Every structure is written in structure tokens, then in C-alpha cells.
Image: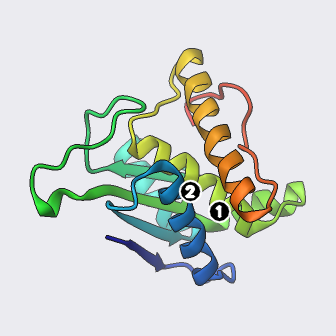
Amino acid sequence: MGVVLRNLQKVAPLRRARLRRDVDTLRHILGVQKFDLGVVCLDNRRIQNINRIYRKKDEPTDVLSFPFYQDLRPDQMPCPLHRDEHNLGDIFLGVEFLMNRCREESLDLHGILTVVTAHGICHLLGYRHETEEEWTEMFQKESYILGEYNRLTGRHLEPLTKRCSQDR
């Protein structure tokens, strides 16, 4: 099983091989490497359109996740019944949105893409952040994932947000 990575934006240069390796490392850390995962990189116009349709928010965003398994609870692994159900879902990355944030905060785009992908995968695995308690649980999971990622790669990534934000 693998990662399908599509780059549908031309705003920022993207190192697809690096992002694919990072996504594979995240999947390994979470023990979901037997599941397919779609990652689609978009510009502001395209991610804003998806955000407007599915979340009723007419603005670009950093990441949108669409889980294959709708009823997972945090730390619950998907239980596929058939071969074609080995799918986590799809993550849409707002590369232009993230690139602008990186410029403002002097951050590395590829590092941030990895962090936001970890956040998206958490959503695919049932994590939410609509309450302070949910946010804390998700932040702890992201911190664990990125800590393991850092240990394996020698990088120094951490979650972007350390407290509950308004309906990210």
C-alpha cells in the first residue's frame, strides 16, 4: 500500500520525493503503512473552493482531511473488511497558504508540510480539536508523532499550534 501524491499547484517549488519520504515515515510511526493515503498539494484558490464547499468557510486554509473511515475514535485503528478498504483517506495541503505563513514566520516550507501532514493524518485517524480536551489529546498525539519523526530523521519539527484555536 502506498501514498498517492499529487501536486496541483505551481506557486511554490515542491520536493515531492522528500515529502513522499516524510509521509512514509509518518505512516510507519503510526503503524498505518498498510493503508493507502492520498496527499494533494493545492494553491489558495483550489483549497479555498474545497473549504467553502465542505466546511462552509470561504477562505484558504492549511490542511483539509477527508477520512475513509468516518467513525474512528482517537487511537482506534481502522479495521478493513475487504482488500479495497485499506485506505486512510485524503489530505489536501494548502501549499500557498503555508508558504505565506512560512515567509511571515521564517519557517521552512518542507518542514511545515510534514508537520501539517501529521496533523491531517491525525484527523484521518479520528482526532478532532473542537474542544479544549480534544485539542489537548490531538496535540499530544502530534507531539508524539513528531518526536518520533525527529528521532528517526535528526530534524527538529514540532506542532504549529500549542493551544486550542478557533475551529481550525
Closest to the observer: 105 or 77?
77
Residue 150 is situated, as x and y percent measured from the top left of the image, at 74, 55
Q: Is residue 62 visible?
A: no
Residue 46 is situated, as x and y percent measured from the top left of the image, at 48, 67
Closest to the observer: 157 or 67?
157
Image marks 1 and 2: residues in contact by CB distance under 8 Å:
yes
For residue 108, what is the image quadrant?
A: bottom right
Residue 21 is situated, as x and y percent measured from the top left of the image, at 57, 73
Q: Secondary structure at mark 2?
A: helix
Mark number displayed over residue 30: none
Horizontal relation, residue 77 to residue 111: left or right: left
Residue most extreme to the front: 152
Depicted 120 relative to depicted 87: above or below: above
Of the 4 image quadrants, the one containing the C terminus is top right
The kind of residue tagged 2 is Thr
The kind of residue tagged 1 is Leu
Depicted 77 relative to depicted 17: above or below: above
Q: Which residue is mark 1?
A: 113
Q: Which residue is mark 2?
A: 117
Of the 4 image quadrants, the one containing the N terminus is bottom left
Closest to the observer: 167 or 65?
65
